[in-house]
Amino acid sequence: MLLASQPTRGLDVGSIEFVHKRIISERDKGLAVVIISAELDEIYALADRIAVMYEGRITGIRPPSVPVEELGLLMAGASGPGDTVPADMSLTGTGAAPGVPGPETRDPGETEAGGAGAPEPDAAGGDE
C-alpha cells in the first residue's frame, strides 16, 4: 500500500508531474494507493474514488466525475441520498478521542470545553 499525504506540497511544477506519474505507475502495477490532499485538482487527477471526511467521518464516496460543488457540500458535512458509510469506516469511531462524544451525541449548544450548553454555576455556589 502507498499512503501519500500532501504528496506535492511545496514542489515545483516539474516535480509535481514526476510525483503524479510515479503514483499512477504504482497504481497501474496493482498497488493500493491512498492519497490525502487538500489540492482538489490533484485529487481529481489521481483518484479512482474520492472519499470525503468531515469531523472524522466519511460523509461520502464519489467517482472523480463528481461536480466540485457536490464535494464542497460533503466537505461541509452534508451527505446525499444513499450515503450510508459503515461506522467502521470512521477514523475516530464515535468521538474525536476515547471518552469524547461525537457530534451526533453532543448537545447542539455544547462546545468542546463545555461552553454554551453547560449550566452556569451560581456565584454563591448554590441553586437559589
Image: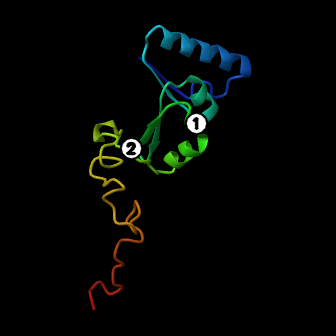
State the image quarter where residue 25 is shown: top right
Q: Residue at x 29, y 83 (%)?
A: 125
Task: Give above or below for 40 relative to 79.
Answer: above
Identify which residue is drawn at 36% across, 85% down.
123
**What numbered label is drawn on residue 38?**
1
Where is 15 relative to 75, above or below? above
Q: Is residue 81 left or right of residue 93?
A: right
Residue position marked by numbered label 2 in the rendering: 83
Toward the top, the furthest residue is: 29
Density class for disc 2 (Cα within 10 Å; few <14, some 14-19, many ≥20) is: few
Q: Residue at x 55, y 44 (%)?
A: 70
Which element type, helix, strand or loop, lies under badge 2? loop
- What is the image's colouring? rainbow
Q: Nearer the viewer, residue 120 or 70?
A: 70
Mark 1 or 2, nearer chain start: 1
Camera-side residue: 57 or 109?
57
Residue at 64% across / 31% down in the picture? Answer: 41
Disc 1 element: loop
Q: Position of residue 7 (x, y in %)?
A: 57, 24
The reply to whether the C-beta atoms of the residues labelled 1 and 2 are less than 8 Å apart is no
Q: Which residue ends up furthest to the bottom in the rendered image?
A: 128
Q: Is residue 101 above or below residue 22?
A: below
Horizontal relation, residue 110 to residue 28: left or right: left
* Residue 37: % across, % down: 55, 32
Assign the C terminus to one quadrant of the image.
Answer: bottom left
- Disc 1 packing (10 Å; few <14; some 14–19; many ≥20): few
User: Percent x, y for residue 93?
Assistant: 30, 43
Three-letter amino acid code of the residue under disc 1: Ala
Above or below, 73 relative to 117: above
User: What is the spatial separation of the Cα atoms under label 1 and label 2, in whole angstroms?
Assistant: 22 Å
How many marks on residues? 2
